[in-house]
């Protein structure tokens, strides 16, 4: 195993996601993993994503352009509305969370983001939500796919940063998670 791969495994989830957002590439992107000049055939096969056909078949594909505009709902019942995506891929909208540990009543909160406009329709995207009802901010990143039967699916990973009272409490300020959004009606 390469040292880069092992160092990524040692990173906390938030640091790994931040490094990925900064342009580092990990795990499935085998062409970018540095190896010595004499990489073995076994190592090459282990890092090649094409060798696992059953995994590849389960990934939904999409032939048309991914349009994030509209209403989406995740498995927890949270909903978001993307007002529109401009020609540069920028968008805004509103997020209606169904879950919160805040003491204040939940309110819809603004979201702003961008998507990578891609010809194959499997766009990547990212957006930020600044919660109106708590001292926290969430950042979502993901990719749009068409699932079985053509339904659209947004696979997303998020970081939630909550305000803490002191630097020694910083260790508990960030949480990570994963949500799957499907288009509503």
Image (tube, rainbow, N blue to C red):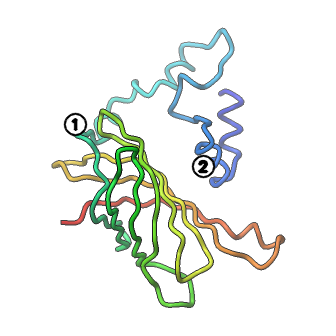
The quarter in which the C terminus is drawn is bottom left
Q: Could you tell whether 118 is left or right of 26 in the image? A: left
159 or 86: nearer the eye? 86
CA distance for labels 1 and 2 = 28 Å
Would you identify the image quadrant in which residue 167 lies? bottom right
Nearer the observer, disc 1 or disc 2? 1
Above or below 155: residue 128 = below
Q: Residue 108 at what x, y percent from top left? A: 42, 78
Q: Residue 3 at what x, y percent from top left? A: 71, 30
Kind of element beneath mark 1: loop
Q: Specify the farthest residue to the front.
A: 87
17 or 114: nearer the eye? 114
Above or below 53: residue 143 = below
The quarter in which the N terminus is drawn is top right
Would you identify the image quadrant in which residue 79 lies? bottom left
Q: Residue at x 39, y 47 (%)?
A: 89
Would you identify the image quadrant in which residue 168 lies? bottom right
Q: Residue 147 at what x, y percent from top left? A: 24, 48
**Mark 1 surroundings within 10 Å by alpha-carbon count, few (fewer than 14), some (14 through 19), many (20 or more):** few
Q: Residue at x 40, y 56 (%)?
A: 91
Q: Could you tell whether 48 is left or right of 118 in the image? A: right
Q: Residue at x 46, y 85 (%)?
A: 106
Q: Residue 55 at what x, y percent from top left? A: 35, 37
**Mark 2 surroundings within 10 Å by alpha-carbon count, few (fewer than 14), some (14 through 19), many (20 or more):** some
For the residues bearing labels 1 and 2, Cβ distance under 8 angstroms: no
Q: Could you tell whether 121 is left or right of 14 in the image? A: left
What's the mark number on residue 63? 1
Q: Specify the farthest residue to the top.
A: 38
Q: Mark 2 = which residue?
A: 17
């Amino acid at each position: 195993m390469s040292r880069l791969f092992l160092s990524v495994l040692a990173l906390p989830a938030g640091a790994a996601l931040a490094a990925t957002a900064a342009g580092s590439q990990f795990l499935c992107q085998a062409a970018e993993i540095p190896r010595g000049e004499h990489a073995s055939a076994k190592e090459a096969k282990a890092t090649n994503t094409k060798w696992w056909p059953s995994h590849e078949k389960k990934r939904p594909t999409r032939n048309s352009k991914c349009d994030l505009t509209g209403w989406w709902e995740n498995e927890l019942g949270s909903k978001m509305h993307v007002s529109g995506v401009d020609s540069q891929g920028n968008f805004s909208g509103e997020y209606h969370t169904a879950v919160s540990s805040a003491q204040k009543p939940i309110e819809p909160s603004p979201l702003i983001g961008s998507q990578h406009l891609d010809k194959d329709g499997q766009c990547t995207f990212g957006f930020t939500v600044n919660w109106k009802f708590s001292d926290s901010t969430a950042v979502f990143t993901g990719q749009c796919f068409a699932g079985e039967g053509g339904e659209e699916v947004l696979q997303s990973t998020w970081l939630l940063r909550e305000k803490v009272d002191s630097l020694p409490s910083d260790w508990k300020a960030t949480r990570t998670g994963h949500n799957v959004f499907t288009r509503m009606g």
